[in-house]
Image (cartoon, helix red, strand yellow):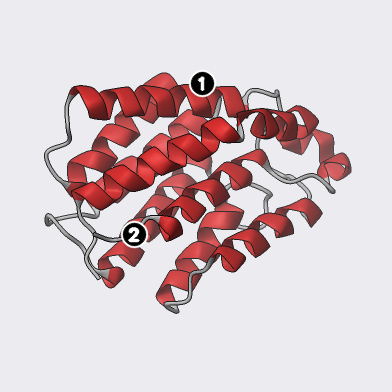
């Protein structure tokens, strides 16, 4: 299987649509344990990204993720902009050809995860988006990534106590809530799984 620029554009546009559809839910989840703007911020950033793709089509696969990274950093407020932005920029740096195969895709997503960990000074188990990214990378290594894997990773965040970000101020009260960043990350990977390779 080869993944190219057109595939990446379809993936990120689909991600944008899923975030728009779930904008209220993402903000409601964030209201419970954060400042309530995750859905609005993500939807705004991904609308801007769609515009950026329409105005100037990326030159190649690498450029798709570079554009995504720059847009998320500059247009998305809160913590999610820098985290998603760093992930996409790191993914862009991990690409050195016009197409990648399944092994290349795994490396690219892993590079995104490393970017988030570094930027957020965080790791799995702290009730963040990493709790979805890490199982996804693991499943990609096993060639076993499915929608069920993504959903299971997301659901696990409910039982975690937040120790990073604004949710960490709630301590024990953060338990029982899904993490909004993990939810938007789940939307990202559902979109990736569903995006057909042309």
Which quadrant is home to the C terminus? bottom left
Q: Residue furthest right?
A: 173
Nearest the viewer among 2 and 34 is: 2
- Residue 196: mark in rendering: 2
Nearest the viewer among 32 and 24 is: 24
As helix, strand or loop, the secondary structure at mark 1 comes to: loop
- Residue 57: mark in rendering: none
- Mark 1 neighbour class, 10 Å CA radius: few under 14, some 14 to 19, many 20 or more: some
As helix, strand or loop, the secondary structure at mark 2 comes to: loop
**Of pointers 1 and 2, the one earlier in the residue sequence:** 1
Residue 1 horizontal side relative to residue 147, left or right: left
Instruction: Give percent across and percent down for residue 148.
Output: 61, 67
Nearest the viewer among 111 and 123 is: 111
Q: Give me the residue at 43% from left, 70% from top.
A: 140
**Rendered view: 2 above or below 130:** below
Instruction: Give percent across and percent down for residue 152.
Output: 66, 64
Residue 37 in view of the camera: yes
Residue 198 horizontal side relative to residue 71, left or right: left
Identify the residue under disc 1: 77
Q: Give me the residue at 31% from left, 22% from top.
A: 51
Residue 83 in view of the camera: no
């Amino acid at each position: 299987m080869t993944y190219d620029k057109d595939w990446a554009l379809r993936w990120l546009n689909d991600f944008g649509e899923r975030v728009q559809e779930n904008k209220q839910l993402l903000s409601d989840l964030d209201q419970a344990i954060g400042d309530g703007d995750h859905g609005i911020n993500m939807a705004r950033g991904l609308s801007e990204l769609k515009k950026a793709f329409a105005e100037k089509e990326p030159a190649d696969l690498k450029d798709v993720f570079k554009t995504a990274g720059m847009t998320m950093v500059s247009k998305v407020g809160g913590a999610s902009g820098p985290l998603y932005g760093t992930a996409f920029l790191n993914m862009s740096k991990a690409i050195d050809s016009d197409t990648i195969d399944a092994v290349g895709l795994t490396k690219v997503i892993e590079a995104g995860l490393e970017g988030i960990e570094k930027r957020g000074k965080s790791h799995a188990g702290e009730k963040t988006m990493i709790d979805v990214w890490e199982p996804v990378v693991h499943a990609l290594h096993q060639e076993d990534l499915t929608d069920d894997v993504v959903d299971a990773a997301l659901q696990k965040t409910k039982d975690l106590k937040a120790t990073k970000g604004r949710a960490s101020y709630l301590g024990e009260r953060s338990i029982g809530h899904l993490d909004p960043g993990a939810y938007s990350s789940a939307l990202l990977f559902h979109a990736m799984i569903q995006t057909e390779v042309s």
